[in-house]
Image (cartoon, rainbow, N blue to C red):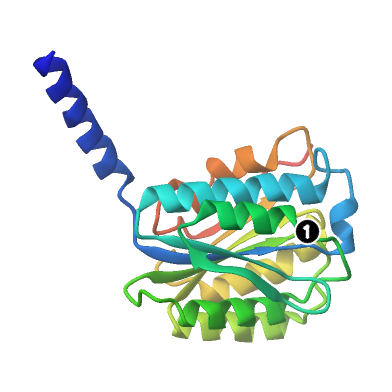
Amino acid sequence: ESTVGSFSRERLREDSLERRMVLEASLVCVDNSEWMRNGDYIPTRMESQADAVNLICNVKTQQNPESTVGVMTSAGRGPEVLVTPTQDLGKILTALHNVKITGSTNFVGTIQVAQLALKHRQNKNQRQRIIAFVGSPLEDDQKDLVKLGKKLKKNNVAVDVVNFGETAENQEKLEAFIAAVNSNENSNLLTVPPGPHILSDIIISSPILQDGEGGGGGMAMPMG
């Protein structure tokens, strides 16, 4: 029995070392615009996104017990932080459940609010990361996105973007944004066109969740 016990402890220690990830405060930006009613992602863009956000929050808090995750929305009257970075997944689930679909997305404004929320994180040793879901047409000019990306890079904020829904329309703008913010391969663009796949399944095997530093650059699912 002692042999089994020591073996189990050894395995647990190895597993925890493998999972030990960078210490981060992350803020997940949810697209809650009218475009989220579309059923081209099963069952809807909104529900597939909510599942993916739930997955990200779970993984991020498990990777490092001192990492925190928050959630905000990007549409409606304006960008709104629902939960500041926390280790309390219950708060995040409740907030996600109460998100209402309304209006259109303000991407630049959302990222600016997210950056401000991360700046005020309690543990300054945490690296800062924004994970933005974009499932509606970007109304922002590309030059404004590049300017924003450079500012984030200067302030040591990493960004991951999940481009779904209006993938073709937004691809060029988001590529330029990620290229501007990317520092030592810490930021990612994941493009997921509609298909039989599950959004959260694609994310879990992507650089966004595969390593704490981020894989860097872009990744796209094949069409069809």
Q: Nearer the viewer, residue 68 or 39?
A: 68
Q: Is residue 171 left or right of residue 155?
A: right
Q: Residue 137's quadrant in the figure?
A: bottom right
Res. 37 in view:
yes
Q: Residue at x 79, y 51 (%)?
A: 46
| Quarter of the rendering occupied by the N terminus | top left
Q: Would residue 19 be found to the left or right of residue 4 on screen?
A: right
Residue furthest left in the image: 2
Q: Is residue 191 left or right of residue 223?
A: left
Q: Position of residue 132 (x, y in %)?
A: 64, 64
How far from the left and from the top, in percent, is residue 159? 54, 68
SS for dot 1: loop
In percent of width and height, residue 26 lies at 50, 65
**Which quadrant would the C terminus be assigned to in this image?**
top right
Query: Viewer-proximal residue, 209 or 121?
Result: 121
Q: Give the side of residue 45 with respect to residue 157, left or right.
A: right
Residue at 44% across / 76% down in the picture? 121
Label 1 neighbour load within 10 Å: few <14, some 14-19, many 20+:
many
- Residues 165 and 106: in front is 106
Q: Please give the count of numbered marks on the rendered protein.
A: 1
38 vs 182: above or below: above
Seen in the picture, residue 140 relative to 208 is either above or below; the reply is below
Amino acid residing under circle 1: Gly
Residue corresponding to mark 1: 135
Q: Does residue 220 appear in the picture of this structure?
A: no
Q: Place residue 183 in its image quadrant.
A: bottom left
Q: Residue at x 12, y 24 (%)?
A: 6
User: Residue 196, image x and y in percent?
Assistant: 77, 32
**Which residue is at 45% across, 84% downward?**
155
